[in-house]
Image (cartoon, coloured by chain):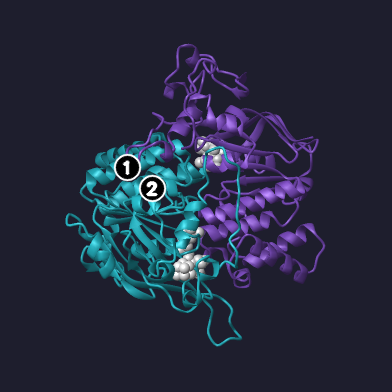
Chain colours: A cyan, B purple
Amino acid sequence: MSKHSGKTLEKKSLQPLVRIEDLHIHFPLPGGFLSRERPKVHAVNGVTLDIMRGEAFCVVGESGCGKTTLGRVLAGLLKPTIGTVTYDGTRIDNLDDHGRRPFRQRIQMIFQNPYASLNPRLTIQQTLEEPLRFHRPDLNAAEITAQVEKVMKSVGNDPEWGSRYPHEFSGGQRQRISIARALVVDPEFIIADEPISALDVSIQAQVLNVMMEARRKHKLTYLFISHDLSVVEHFGDRVAVMYLGSVCELAETAKLFANPQHPYTRLLLSSIPKMDGSSFVHVPVPGEVPSPVNLPSGCPFHERCPLANDRCKIEKPILKHQKSGTTVACHAVEEGRSN
Amino acid sequence: MTLLQIRNLEVDFPTRYGPIKVLRGIDLDIEAGERVGIVGESGAGKSMAAFAIMNLISEPGHISAGSVEFEGRDLAKISDEEMRLLRGDRISMIFQDPMMTLNPVLTIGDQMVETLQAHRNISYNEARDLALDKLREVRIPSPEARFDGYPHELSGGLRQRVVIAIALLSDPALIIADEPTTALDVTIQAEILALLLELCREHGAALILITHDLAVVSQVTERIVVMYAGNIIESGSTRKVTDTPSHPYTMGLIAALPEQNAPGTPLNQIRGAMPMMNAVPPGCAFSPRCDYADKKCSTEKPELREVTGRLVACHHASKLKRSRKAGK
Ligand SMILES: Nc1ncnc2c1ncn2[C@@H]1O[C@H](COP(=O)(O)OP(=O)(O)OP(=O)(O)O)[C@@H](O)[C@H]1O
Ligand SMILES: Nc1ncnc2c1ncn2[C@@H]1O[C@H](COP(=O)(O)OP(=O)(O)OP(=O)(O)O)[C@@H](O)[C@H]1O
Ligand code: SF4
Ligand SMILES: [Mg+2]
Ligand SMILES: [Mg+2]
């Protein structure tokens, strides 16, 4: 699969920084005493991706489709059940704590939940200084203070916040502290899991501007997970659309938004709320929400797909390069019955 | 009928570095069945306003002035026990932090059954069936398997849906939803919003929707309240406020939307940052960041006044050019 995406999307100037190959992640669930097999959540089911150096790579998709899980594997917080992750030429998914160490500063993660990701016992200043002390033993105390102040200001935080504790801040303020913590050590790859969804639009704009600028200046690479498609459209170079642990469409951002191919991508884009004065209309999608516990056979989307036929119920479509310039996993698109 | 009436509400936090006033005099009326959106700068006091209504402000914070009346009763004057019964029954809150609702050591099912049995006299099996129905309604896949699972096993969005399911267990007259769909993808978001709207339309529940998503507020609510640094600075019909924002902060907010900027270009941002709540500047709190500020703005605090059919707290609101039409 990587051959398809690799051949066409690899621009000469870009080297893959991250290579994910056939990644599967399962979580066991409680129960299943009566049946022979313990039920498990199939959070990620065979994802293959390349992320280029300097790229803003976005992941969107249904909630629970495995985005955070994917991010946690890349950040080294979770071992894959099957598959490999290669970072800058080194395989990193199977490293122990010691082997991982050199990558900890280079790869930073901004977590989805700002309420759970800050240590309640540390002041904001301590929270930001700690990673700097650890990763940058070359800096003296004054340099550390200066670096913390610079980064705090860049994401719109008052440096005076330093003496306070996380519980004294609102959700959005905590998220800005988490963002500052990720940026403070000068990483090269940032996994940003819904980094700005807790922020108001003007701070969103400010943080996105900081992230875009850091990218230009330091050639930062992003894996950007978001439900906000207008932000993705603004920020991303490429987008992977995930559904039930699989990538169903992968395309350059502009192409995806101009001409979505996969039926799930189309559903997703048509559900974006608009500010055009229209009132809310909701056309319910028929069918049960499929479960990662009992994965459907065939195409993961077939139970809700308006284009599904018998083949879709049996055979899982694989990502294939399409004439439109995008990569799609859908029999209907492949058979030319999607338009 | 006025369901909720907030008058001159102030909330104080005494801290190591002096007292902080996080709500600085808020007036808000919500009619039965009305849907009102609250938007505003992060840290402006939106969640705090919700906590004040629920009487859930965490120590050492407290209501230092003003009143909250719900269904004609002054909430400051009722007993803790009465307040506890009101919460989760007449008023349901969906918290911004799902773990405010969820207990990490209890299974999803146990917490739902416990909530149900606290307010109603029903058997375990009845409660279980009801809970499973609600989990289905919020589109949790494999509800039976999730019923016996723990909160940490759920993705951010699934956890949020469980919280929404718990909030919908009763038949509330007022739903306060603090960023309820922020963690959800747009298709599930649409389903949850449809569910909330149905609850409002069919059961006459009123909704206070706190969110940063201006498109969501614009589609779901009838009225918008914009907050900045502990005050309401603009309030009016949703259509009016989003089409012709009249406070310079609201204007800046709408101009910052990615839709208003070409892909990849720097987004319009409001210069500066919101002040710390212990150092709110005199006069208009927004004045250090405002393009229209003059001397009066830095000395005299503007009150909410009617300007072109909505309330605006800005000395110059009637003179500003309101040209920024929202949406594409
Ligand atoms: N520790 C765990 N134990 C059991 N199941 C888990 C665990 N962590 C995640 N899961 C499950 O794996 C699936 C994928 O979760 P993940 O958090 O990656 O989703 P997501 O795409 O990030 O969703 P969201 O947009 O809601 O954050 C979900 O069904 C989730 O419930
Ligand atoms: N325990 C506390 N001590 C001191 N100040 C606090 C405390 N809790 C909250 N605050 C302050 O109160 C203000 C209002 O917080 P609130 O949570 O209501 O903001 P919000 O408008 O909901 O923001 P967001 O959109 O980020 O959730 C913030 O400026 C915050 O820093
Ligand atoms: S493969 Fe079939 S079921 Fe899957 S999205 Fe395409 S048409 Fe729908
Ligand atoms: Mg997630
Ligand atoms: Mg809040």
Residues marked 1 and 2 touching at CB (< 8 Å): no
Label of residue B197 in the image? none
Which quadrant holds the N terminus of chain B? top right
Q: Is residue B254 left or right of residue B8?
A: left
Is B8 on the left-hand or right-hand side of A228? right
Task: Place residue A57 in its image quadrant.
Answer: bottom left
Residue B270 in view:
yes
* Residue A245 seen in this snapshot: no
Left/right placement of residue B37 relative to residue A207 reads: right
Q: Residue furthest bottom?
A: A36
Q: Is residue A35 above or below residue A291?
A: below
10 Å crowding of disc 2: few (<14), some (14-19), many (20+): many
Q: Chain of mark 2?
A: A
How packed mark 1 is, by other alpha carbons closer than 10 Å (few <14, some 14-19, many 20 or more), is some
Label 1 to label 2: alpha-carbon separation: 9 Å
The percent coordinates of residue A66 (x first, y second) are 45, 64
Residue A311 lies, in percent from the top left, at: 47, 77
Front residue (pair A120, A250): A250
Residue A323 position within the rendered picture, expressed as x and y whole percent measured from the top left: 31, 62
Q: Which of these two is toward me, B204 or B284?
A: B204
The residue at which mark 1 appears reads as B264
The disc labelled 1 sits on which kind of residue? Gly
Are both tags, 1 and 2, on one chain? no
Q: Which residue is mark 2?
A: A233
Q: Tell me the subunit letter for badge 1.
A: B
Query: Which residue is at 47% across, 62% downward?
Result: A263
What is the quadrant of residue B26 in the picture? top right
